[in-house]
Amino acid sequence: MRRKLAAGNWKMNGTATALAELETLAAAGAQAQTDVLICPPSTLISRAAAISGSVAIGGQDCHANASGAHTGDISAEMLKDAGASHVILGHSERREDHGEADADVRSKATAAWSAGLISVICVGESLAEREADNTLDIIGGQLAGSIPDEATGENLVVAYEPIWAIGTGKVPTMSQIGEVHDFMRTQLEMRFGEGVGRSVRLLYGGSVKPSNATEIFAVSNVDGALVGGASLKAADFSAIITALDAA
Ligand code: PGA
């Protein structure tokens, strides 16, 4: 039985005043069946971890090296030291803005595991790839290239985030989400064996809101969500958590 996961990605949003939203989430307490994760900007991680209660805290990226001359970067050890338990890797905005390839994501995931962090590895097709009917090829390639061999149900979460659905208000049909999630489950089972493949949690991400959460969470092999915009306000994110806990 996979525990559900509601993960919020604040992206490059939030200064100290945003911590009030996290305090509201933390005050709501633990959910019966759903883990809750917030990934604030790295400047807020240690302050967030100090007030987050049962809400886990994660980074949004890490470097593949543990330390060294990498100006502006942050290592997995540093995230862990600041109080993070998770790190998002290979988000499409990292892949686009910073030219991250699957091999980079894979190295970062290995670094995250060495530091004791859970990796939330993101995959997703562009609109052009979807329209060319290449979605499953793209997702299969990203899974194969981005996930290291040492994956387990404890150290890995995979997020399917169609690039064209992120921040756009556009959401795939439920059958499109189901097709990709079933495919990802099969790919993981084939590569890592049924035990591991069945235990990795698969999140959907891309314009998840309180108004569409219930139908998305009813789709097979959707174990939760990676939420951008709607995670910035505790009221919206709480409604998504409630929908997931009830699914
Ligand atoms: P969104 O972002 O919920 O704002 O569409 C999702 C994501 O990028 O993780």
Image (spheres, rainbow, N blue to C red):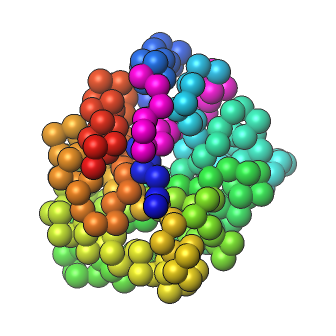
As drawn, is 124 to the left or to the right of 48? left
Look at the image and give the residue range highlighted in magenta. Answer: 28-49
| x and y percentages locating residue 159 in the rendered image | 43, 59
Residue at the bottom extreme of this rendering: 190
**Residue at coordinates 36% horizontally, 50% vertically from top-left?**
225
- Please say if 237 is above or below 1: above
**Residue at coordinates 61% horizontally, 33% vertically from top-left?**
42
The reply to whether residue 99 is in sight is: no
- Please say if 88 is above or below 15: below
The reply to whether residue 186 is in sight is: yes
**Residue at coordinates 69% horizontally, 33% vertically from top-left?**
83
| x and y percentages locating residue 46 in the rendered image | 66, 26
**Is 43 in the magenta?**
yes
As drawn, is 176 to the left or to the right of 19? left
| x and y percentages locating residue 32 in the rendered image | 42, 39
**Residue at coordinates 35% horizontally, 78% vertically from top-left?**
183
